[in-house]
Image: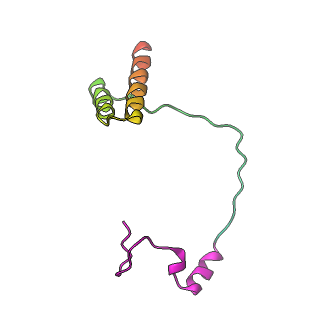
Amino acid sequence: MGFTGDDKLGPWKVSDAPDRYIALLQKSIIGVQIEITSLGGKFKMSQESPEKYREGVIAGFKNLNNDIGNEMARTVSERQDIMSSKK
């Protein structure tokens, strides 16, 4: 990334655009306020995939050889065990 179409390196910035273009776009900016009354979540840890795929996911995370990979492997394995016990 970072290609700007010329010899300039780095990501594009709004300040790179002409002032007239920026002024035109600013007229289209609107604000929105949303009241959050509840949040819900769902684990998506490959638990609905076939067992061989889940095992591959677990192995892949373990192969990262770091704390985050190990934690993710443990979580996928736990979710796999939970799903298996519900059958």
Residue 22 horizontal/vertical position (percent): 58, 80
Tally of numbered discs: 0
Write the residue at 52% across / 32% down.
42
Please tell me whether residue 12 belongs to the stretch shown in magenta. Answer: yes
| In this view, 50 is above or below 23 | above
Write the residue at 38% across / 69% down.
2
| In this view, 29 is above or below 46 | below
Position of 40 with respect to 77 (left or right) is right
Identify the residue at the far front of this view: 66
The boundaries of the magenta stretch are: 1-28
Main SS, magenta residues = loop
Q: Please state which of residues 69 and 85 is positioned toward the viewer in this rendering.
A: 69
Residue 80 falls in image quadrant: top left
- Tell me the quadrant of the picture where the N terminus can be found: bottom left
The colouring scheme, among rainbow, by chain, secondary structure or one colour, is rainbow
Residue 82 horizontal/vertical position (percent): 44, 18
Write the residue at 53% across / 85% down.
18
Position of 68 with respect to 18 (left or right) is left
Residue 83 falls in image quadrant: top left
- Tell me the quadrant of the picture where the C terminus can be found: top left
Residue 47 falls in image quadrant: top left
Please tell me whether residue 67 belongs to the stretch shown in magenta. Answer: no
